[in-house]
Structure formats: structure tokens, C-alpha cells
Image (tube, rainbow, N blue to C red):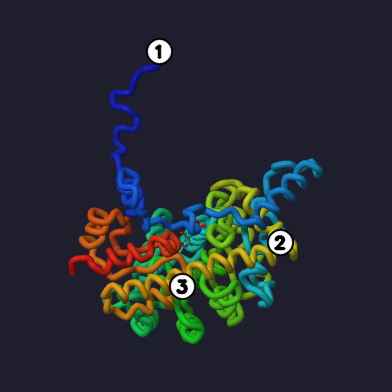
Amino acid sequence: MPQLLEQSAFAAIPFAPLHDQIVAVTEAFRKDPRKEKINLSIGVYRDEQGILPVFESVKQAEAMIAEQERSSGTGKAYSPIEGLPEFREASSKLIFGNVSREHIVTVQTIGGSGALTLTAILAREFLAPEKVYFSDPCWVNHPGIFKLQKVKTAKLPYYDAERCKLLFDDFCSSLERLSSGSIVLLQASCHNPSGVDLSKQQWRTLSDLFKENQLIPILDLAYQGLAESLEDDAYAARLFANEGIPGFVAHSFSKSMSLYGERTGSLSIVTESAEQAQAVMSQLKNIIRPLYSNAPIHGAKIAATVLNDSTLSSQWQNEVGQLRTRINGLRRLLAAELKKNGVTDDLRYIAEGHGMFALLKLTPQQVAQLAEKHALYLVPDGRICIPALTMENVERVAKAIGNIDR
Ligand code: PLP
């Protein structure tokens, strides 16, 4: 009989609740017995019927992949450490368009989150930044990903939820105060959680500022195609690469191909020469190999098949366009309904904002009241998931928000 330890090996590990508030909201929603309840806190796209869509282009690609795996005899082989070449090339082309790419390397990653983890490790190992900076507010997982890799983080003012206002001048002034070599994460489109993006003119101002102050950008492109178009949403990534600003682009197909659980993404690193690019690639491989060996193949095969087949690619562009059109329509409708129900704020941040989220001007107490009285579940900071709205429920949601105790 093995000797028992005096104290169990894991006794020193205390229970810790998940840091993500959305999990708690989802749990409260699940327990609510009311039929009319709506979960407005989730971060995935659902259609008018509440269904998470599988794109037709994706279904066709999956059939082609199954046939190819059968007939080629390659089955479910491992991918190379850096990912499937056809996926890396197609992703890189989708992100950078016509920008010349000898000085850019792209590796396949475990979703956009995996791309950010690789960024954090590479930054820690080779760039030794004092801190990595995020917009305030930022995606709830951004600081956690970097902190886990022992990289210090801080936030820069970006959006004032009280005044429903982008703080572009303040953002620029804070950037100007950073020391050269500082790393700053910018969301390229569909800012999560505010939905408030930068204009092309503002991106040009930032690219000048990054160049002049030698700041290093991480462009998080998790929603390409859901704001204005596949091209326009990649504007920042193309501009910074064209301007020769060295930095990172973390890309994801979770939302734009509705491939959430397939964990399909990429990390591109823009360097200053083809030689530097190869050196960076060699180090990325040395990080990936002990970290998870190589990324999952199925989602990457789907994305590559869709992007590399002209018929499937135009079908996909249509499908992502339908998501965008519905989201933008819902944004305008919600703003109009809120106005009808007495909300006097400038609601352009909702109507003209981009992507899946908006940050409603609500206190945590008001959010709690919406859950209690109306079975409407939002994140305590007031973030609402726009595609959780439907033509049927938007009126009720706006009425409840309009009539909240202020
Ligand atoms: N970046 C932002 C801003 C996000 O909102 C998300 C997902 O919600 C991600 C990155 C990561 O996406 P993925 O699911 O591909 O890891």
C-alpha cells in the first residue's frame, strides 16, 4: 500500500471562481425559470431563431475535406509545427491583401486567444516590455492572457461609457507619453466591448504616432468582415504593415466563419526584413513545439478550403455579409427603440457602432434590476450582445431599458 502523504498533495490549492463575469451571468440566466428570459451577455453570434449558424460554405468545405482525407490516405495527420501551409498563406492574404509579405511571417494558432498567448510569450522572451497596454475598456480576457505569461499590463483611456464618447485625443496623448519599445494592443475593428472603432483618418494618425514614438502594435483582428467589409476591417493591419511598422496581428475565424469551437486563428508578425522574418519564425516554432506541439487541423482545413476555392469563397463572403447586415440593422433598430422609450443620450455609439457589442450606459445596479424585473441578462458593465436581439424582442428590451430607475 502506498504511503499516504500527511497532507493531500493538492490541499494548498484554494478554490477560485472564474475571473470572467459573463460565466456568472450565464449561470444566473440558466437558473431563471421565466420563459421570456433573454441572455444578452453572450459573446457568440446567434441568428433570428437563436441558432448558432454553420455556414453553407463551411458545410461544403467539410464534405470536401472528408473526401480528401479518405482518398489521399493522409487522414488526420499532424500539421507542421507552424500550421498548415495552405491555411497560413490564405489567412495572411485575407489579412494583408496586396501588401508585400516577404517581411511577414504567419503561424496557425489556437484561435485568436492562442495568437495572443504566443504574442505574450514572444514579447516576454525577446522584447522585454515594461508593460503591455490595452484600451480602457478592453476585452475581458486581454489582461489575463498577458498576466498569465508574467507580462505586466496597464490600460489607456479609450472610451467614456458615461458620456458615450470615444476618447481619441486622450488615447493619443497617453501613447505619446509611453517610452519607445512599449507594446500596445489595438482592436482593429468591432471593438469589444464598446463597439466604437477608429476611423481611417484616426488609424493614420496612430500609425504616424507609432512610427514616430517607436511603439509596437498588437492588432487584434477577431471580427474581420463584421464591421464594414473584409477589406475595410483589415485597414489598420494593412496600413501598419505598409508603413513598415514592426508588430503583431492576432487573427481569428471564430466569428467571421462561425468556427468558434474549432479554434482557428493565426498570428502574423510584421518584421523589417525577410531575414528577420525567418528568425522570428524559427523562435515561434521553438515556442509552439513545447507549448502544444501543433495546432488542430480541422478548422484550419475548413478555412483554407473556403478561402482557396473561388465559389466557396464568394459564398462565404456573402454569408459573413449577411451577419454584418443583420447586426448593423439591429444596432440602428435598438437605437431607434431606445429613443422612442425616452433615452435621451446620443445613441450614435449604438447605431453607428460596429460588431457584436455595445456598452450601454447602465450601472451594475440597473443591470441587476433588468435581470430581476425583466429577465434580461447583461454583463454588469452594461455590455450587450447585439445579435442576441431579434426583431421580436428588441422592442421589449428597449422598453425595459428606457423605463429603468435612473
Ligand atoms: N479578441 C477579441 C477582441 C475577442 O472578442 C475575442 C473573442 O471573443 C478574441 C480575441 C478571441 O477569439 P477566439 O475565440 O478565436 O480565441
Crowd band around label 3 with a 10 angstrom C-alpha radius: few (<14), some (14–19), many (20+): many
- Give residue 61's position: percent from left, percent from top: 70, 53
- Give residue 186's position: percent from left, percent from top: 45, 72
Helix, strand or loop status at disc 1: loop
Query: Is residue 287 at all visible to an observer of this figure?
Result: no
Numbered tag placed on residue 354 in the rendering: 3
Query: Quick check: 126 left or right of 279?
Result: left
Q: Is residue 16 above or below residue 132?
A: above
For badge 3, the amino acid type reads: His
Give the CA distance from mark 3 to mark 2: 26 Å
For badge 1, the amino acid type reads: Met
Helix, strand or loop status at disc 2: helix
Residue sitting nearer the eye, 125 or 206: 206
Residue at image coords 27%, 56%: 374
Numbered tag placed on residue 1 in the rendering: 1
Residue to which mark 2 is pinned? 312
